[in-house]
Image: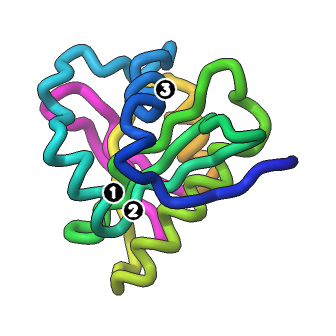
């Protein structure tokens, strides 16, 4: 699989948003939940990790080292199923481990491809959030 994983910069914001809003599942209906300041924090601190091929960003992940959560993992729908998500997930987990976390958490839409992805990765569903998302915990 050709491609590199690199940290995002401010110049990548538009492509990150484009991918986030192109997904078919886990659609962000309330765009105010992800602010400019939040994205800035991730770019400047633990990093938003990008998968890039031939100069084009095809996916991204972000881990919140403050609380041990996976904040984001999204792949351009035209490039799903190629292992890009697994590689970006591993990079996000690495960031959490380096920050001293031994377990992580995340939420996702029940019954989605992401839901099955995290189960296959060995993460355990432990409940449902107030927004109806499945809550997962996993070892790092």
| Residue 42 shown left or right of residue 140 in the figure | left
Query: Helix, strand, or loop for circle 2?
Result: loop
Q: Report if the CB atoms under discs 2 and 1 are less than 8 Å apart.
A: yes
Secondary structure predominantly adopted by residues drawn in magenta:
strand
Q: Residues within 10 Å of mark 2 (few under 14, many from 20)?
A: many
Q: Which residues are magenta?
A: 123-140
Tell me if 19 is positioned left or right of 103 in this view: right
Q: Is residue 99 above or below residue 27?
A: below
Q: Dot 1: what SS? A: helix
Q: Earlier in the sequence, mark 1 or mark 3?
A: 3
What residue would you read off at disc 2?
A: 47
Tell me if mark 3 has few (under 14), some (14-19) or many (20+) residues whose alpha carbon lies within 10 angstroms of its own: some
Q: Position of residue 20 (x, y in %)?
A: 42, 27
Residue at coordinates 48% horizontally, 16% vertically from top-left? Answer: 22
x and y percent of residue 83 in the render? Answer: 75, 44
Which residue is the site of mark 3? 19
Residue 124 rendering spot, x and y as whole percentages: 46, 53
Distance CA(mark 2)–CA(mark 3): 17 Å
Q: Quadrant of residue 130?
A: top left
* Residue neighbourhood size for the residue with mark 1, other residues' Cα within 10 Å, grouped as few (<14), some (14–19), many (≥20): some
Q: CA distance from mark 1 to mark 3?
A: 16 Å
Which residue shows up at 37% across the image and 18% down it? 27
The figure's colour scheme reads: rainbow
For residue 43, the mark is 1
Whether residue 124 is in magenta: the answer is yes
- Circles 2 and 3, Cβ within 8 Å, touching? The answer is no
């Amino acid at each position: 699989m050709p491609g590199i994983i690199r940290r995002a910069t401010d110049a990548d914001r538009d492509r990150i948003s484009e991918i986030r809003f192109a997904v078919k599942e886990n659609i962000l209906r309330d765009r105010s939940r992800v602010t400019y300041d939040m994205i800035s924090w991730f770019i400047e601190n633990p990093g938003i990790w990008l998968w890039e091929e031939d100069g084009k960003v095809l996916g991204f992940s972000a881990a919140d080292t403050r609380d041990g959560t996976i904040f984001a993992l999204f792949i351009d729908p035209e490039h799903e199923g190629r292992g890009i998500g697994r590689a970006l997930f591993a990079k996000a987990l690495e960031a959490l481990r380096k920050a001293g976390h031994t377990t992580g958490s995340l939420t996702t839409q029940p019954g989605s491809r992401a839901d099955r992805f995290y189960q296959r990765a060995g993460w355990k569903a432990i409940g449902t959030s107030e927004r109806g998302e499945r809550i997962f915990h996993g070892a790092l």
